[in-house]
């Protein structure tokens, strides 16, 4: 259940990417998602990205935190009664499927921006230390209480150094001047935009769900776009010579020379269609591609339809990322799945929308997907790529 009077428009206008804000009682009934015992079990699974951070409160920041990377042996885990430690589980929504529901609560923001949910369990005094993130994060408090300190926004473009001697993966910064301080309880959500230093300390055994967002860096966008443009070029497309008889010095690159080269490159980079494909592919790259296994053999529609029935569902792989774009009425629909793009006739749009819809549903039930040959072929390709799979229906 979500806070009924949360003003999304006000949030987007005044806070999103600008200011931290505490939203009291944003969620109710958070108890059911998970519990410390289940998280400790998950931390022992080999494929899980888990970490334990132990705090020595009496030390300075540089020596206060130590990091142990999972997976863990059950008998190497600290006792729940022990103070000053925190367990972090990355991409927790893949292990606790009900967390997809929490992701849906942020449906007022583009889903392709969501990176994952990291769950942290911390005993009293536990936390990850003062740090800042490059991304927006919603810190959703589950069980227990945590006190968060927030500082003044720092300049993300300036070079930043962790205190000497700290473990670099902890991304710690020195203690900062505290501007805002909140003690959060179950259901409260603290939104922290990129670049705001923050620091949470658990007051009692507590759970926090960090709904993290992704934002491609300018360098990543240029890299994926230029790779896409390069795929369209051939070896024989080369710079043509513009030398004139008036050449002053054979050692000189003349303004005419480099400007001509620049015009050629700028012309190639003006390819908006290639940019759109590169961008869609970049932002739908899977965070955990190891959970998306392509099938060895081509999938045929008759084989797939043979599974349709009361016991089997066809659903999206929760590790897969789906998004689509539609330009104008006449343009084809572009579907992006796990970094691949698929061009489809505009008539397939209702099916594509259903395929990308927020709530995971049985795709066998979506009639639009099965009416057109083009979308049937698409479904087969997506099953083969591992982005869609067959599962047993839950009762
Ligand atoms: C935590 O869960 O303790 C840390 C989350 C964050 O600061 O992003
Ligand atoms: Co953070």
Image (cartoon, rainbow, N blue to C red):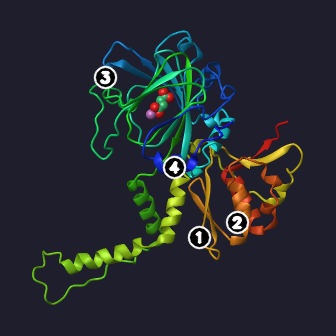
Disc 4, disc 1: CB below 8 Å?
no
Q: Residues within 10 Å of mark 1 (few under 14, many from 20)?
A: few
Disc 2 from disc 4: Cα separation: 28 Å
Percent position (x, y) of residue 242? 24, 84
Residue 298 appears in the picture as rendered: no
Q: Earlier in the sequence, mark 4 or mark 3?
A: 4
Q: Earlier in the sequence, mark 3 or mark 2?
A: 3
Q: Earlier in the sequence, mark 2 or mark 4?
A: 4
Q: Earlier in the sequence, mark 3 or mark 1?
A: 3
Percent position (x, y) of residue 174? 30, 28
State the residue position of label 1. Answer: 327
Pick whichever, 313 or 233, lies toward us: 313
Q: Quadrant of ligand 2?
A: top left
**Mark linked to residue 349:** 2
Up the image or down, 13 lies above or below 43; here it is below
Q: Residue at x 38, y 76 (%)?
A: 267
Residue 71 appears in the picture as rendered: yes
Up the image or down, 366 lies above or below 72; here it is below
State the residue position of label 4. Answer: 12
Q: Is residue 290 rendered to the left or right of residue 31?
A: left
Q: Secondary structure at mark 2?
A: helix
State the residue position of label 3. Answer: 62
Considering the image in quadrants, where does the N terminus appear?
top right
Q: Earlier in the sequence, mark 4 or mark 1?
A: 4
Disc 4 from disc 3: Cα separation: 36 Å
Considering the image in quadrants, where does the C terminus appear?
top right
Disc 3 from disc 2: Cα separation: 54 Å
Direction right: furthest residue: 310
Percent position (x, y) of residue 342? 63, 64
């Amino acid at each position: 259940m979500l806070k009924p009077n949360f003003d999304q428009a006000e949030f987007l206008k005044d806070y999103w990417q600008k200011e931290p804000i505490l939203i009291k009682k944003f969620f109710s009934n958070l108890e059911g998602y998970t519990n410390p015992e289940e998280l400790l079990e998950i931390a022992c699974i080999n494929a899980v990205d888990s970490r334990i951070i132990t705090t020595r409160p009496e030390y300075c920041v540089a020596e206060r935190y130590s990091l142990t990377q999972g997976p863990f042996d059950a008998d190497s885990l600290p006792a729940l009664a022990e103070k000053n430690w925190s367990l972090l589980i990355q991409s927790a929504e893949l292990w606790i499927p009900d967390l997809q529901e929490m992701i849906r609560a942020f449906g007022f923001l583009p889903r392709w921006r969501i990176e994952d949910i990291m769950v942290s369990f911390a005993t009293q005094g536990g936390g990850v230390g003062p740090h800042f993130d490059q991304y927006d994060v919603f810190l959703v408090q589950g069980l227990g209480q945590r006190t968060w300190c927030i500082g003044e926004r720092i300049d993300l473009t300036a070079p930043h150094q962790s205190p000497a001697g700290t473990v670099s993966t902890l991304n710690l910064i020195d203690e900062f001047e505290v501007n805002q301080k909140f003690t959060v309880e179950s259901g409260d959500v603290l939104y922290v935009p990129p670049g705001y230093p923050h620091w949470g300390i658990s007051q009692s055994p507590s759970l926090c769900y960090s709904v993290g967002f992704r934002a491609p860096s300018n360098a990543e966008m240029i890299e994926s776009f230029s790779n896409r443009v390069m795929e369209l070029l051939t070896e024989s497309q080369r710079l043509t010579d513009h030398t004139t008889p008036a050449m002053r010095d054979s050692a000189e690159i003349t303004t005419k020379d480099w400007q001509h080269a620049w015009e050629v490159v700028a012309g190639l980079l003006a390819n908006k269609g290639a940019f759109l494909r590169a961008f869609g592919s970049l932002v739908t790259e899977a965070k955990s591609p190891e959970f998306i296994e392509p099938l060895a053999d081509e999938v045929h529609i008759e084989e797939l339809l043979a599974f349709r029935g009361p016991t089997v569902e066809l659903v999206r792989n929760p590790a897969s990322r789906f998004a689509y774009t539609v330009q104008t009425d006449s343009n084809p629909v572009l579907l992006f799945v796990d970094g691949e793009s698929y061009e489809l006739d505009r008539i397939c749009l209702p099916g594509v929308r259903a395929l990308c819809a927020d709530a995971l549903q049985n795709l066998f039930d979506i009639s639009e997907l099965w009416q057109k040959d083009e979308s049937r072929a698409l479904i087969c390709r997506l099953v083969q790529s591992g982005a869609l799979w067959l599962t047993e229906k839950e009762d």
